[in-house]
Amino acid sequence: MDRYAEYRAVARDVGADALALVPGPNFARVMGKNFHSHERPMVVVVPVEGAPAAIVPNLELGSFELVNFEGEVFDWRDQDGYQDAFDALARHLPIRHLAVEGQVMRVFVHHALARAYKGLEIIDAEREISAIRLCKTPAEIAALEDAIRLSEAALEETLEQVRAGQTEKQVESLLIQALFRNGAEDLAFGPIVAAGDNSARPHASARADYQIRPGDALLFDWGGRHGGFAADITRTVFVGHATDEGQEVYDTVLRANLKGHEVTRPGATAHDVDDAVTSVLEASPFADRIRTKTGHGLGRDVHEAPYIMRGNHQKLTPGMVFTDEPGLYEIGKFGVRIEDDILVTEDGCRSLTTMSKELRVVG
């Protein structure tokens, strides 16, 4: 079986002679091992026909041997620089049109390829390459569920320890420890732990100088990684008690979240889901607090296709996984977001997240 077959097909479809992969989700999917992007370029070039070739930093050769690579490897050392390796690649594998991951390949790698291949046309095939990962296999769904289960268990442990007077940073530390204690191989992303007015910032950073107060909304956006796949969940709780306004905003967001589950099915579009969810928020007294789209795809990347937003008429198909995360945010006051990870099934959808969404008071 040719593990590069789907990528060769993309290259052919976009009119390229070959396709280049750099460390990231597609690289990990093909190679079965994750390599980090840093100042040392690593590239695998897959031609439409024939064996691939790779540029690998010398210090990574020991790790790269583990992927059982089938083609020529051109390594380079820090003291010599990498351009000679790119030039050797060009002599070994002459091509004129190269498809690349436009959102992943860095500019200096692009330039090194252009210097090695005179007159090379570099084609941004991000959409076509990403489409390969749109529908998850049963094994990939199982890995996602493992990541989600351990992440939910970690938050449950954390919520039992939350008290007024703690700082956001202290709670963040509790959550991170709980994620690893429950089996996370890594963080999916730096978690968001935001209380009070900070919860109104959708991508807030935890503060070390703010002590959580009774009545605060406390928003958690978090996830662990397992088997190469990431969880991405949000729950908002209240500390000590919830105000009447907090209860009303929470109920509105929950209705919107549930509407997303209701309308998700094969054949519906990303636009349909976002329109239905956002319409619930727009019909509420809090329409001026809408700041984000409904969600995004989830898998090896925390943010990937499909993007659940108005204007995206991509049809949903079984195996797609995306987040349903409506929120309402009043700057200077508080915010509420509820986020589930949803799998599109043959006859509708299934929530991979199972943690309760009833309004919860802690501490």
Image: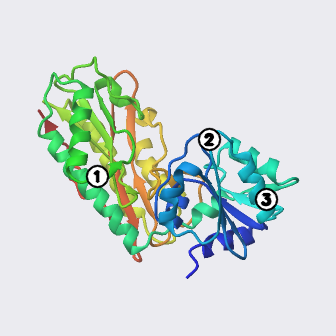
Report which residue position mark 3 lands on: 90
Q: Secondary structure at mark 3?
A: helix
Picture residue at 29% right of the left edge, 36% below the top: 219
Q: Earlier in the sequence, mark 3 or mark 2?
A: 2
Report the residue at 62% width, 76% height from top.
5
For residue 33, above or below residue 246: below
Compared across the picture, whether 302 is left or right of 175 comes to right
Q: State yes or no: discs 3 and 1 in contact (Cβ < 8 Å).
A: no
> Which amino acid type is shown beneath numbered disc 3?
Ala
- Please indicate whether residue 249 sits to the left or right of residue 305 in the image: left
Q: Nearer the viewer, mark 1 or mark 2?
A: 2
The residue that label 2 is drawn on is: 78
Residue designated by label 1: 184
Quick one: which residue is furthest to the right in this view?
119
Q: Give the mark, 1 or 2, whose residue is nearer the N terminus.
A: 2
Q: Is residue 17 left or right of residue 33?
A: right
Q: CA distance from mark 3 to mark 2?
A: 20 Å
- Circle 2 SS class: loop
Count residues near mark 3 (Cα–Cα under 10 Å), then give few for <14, some for 14-19, many for 20+: some
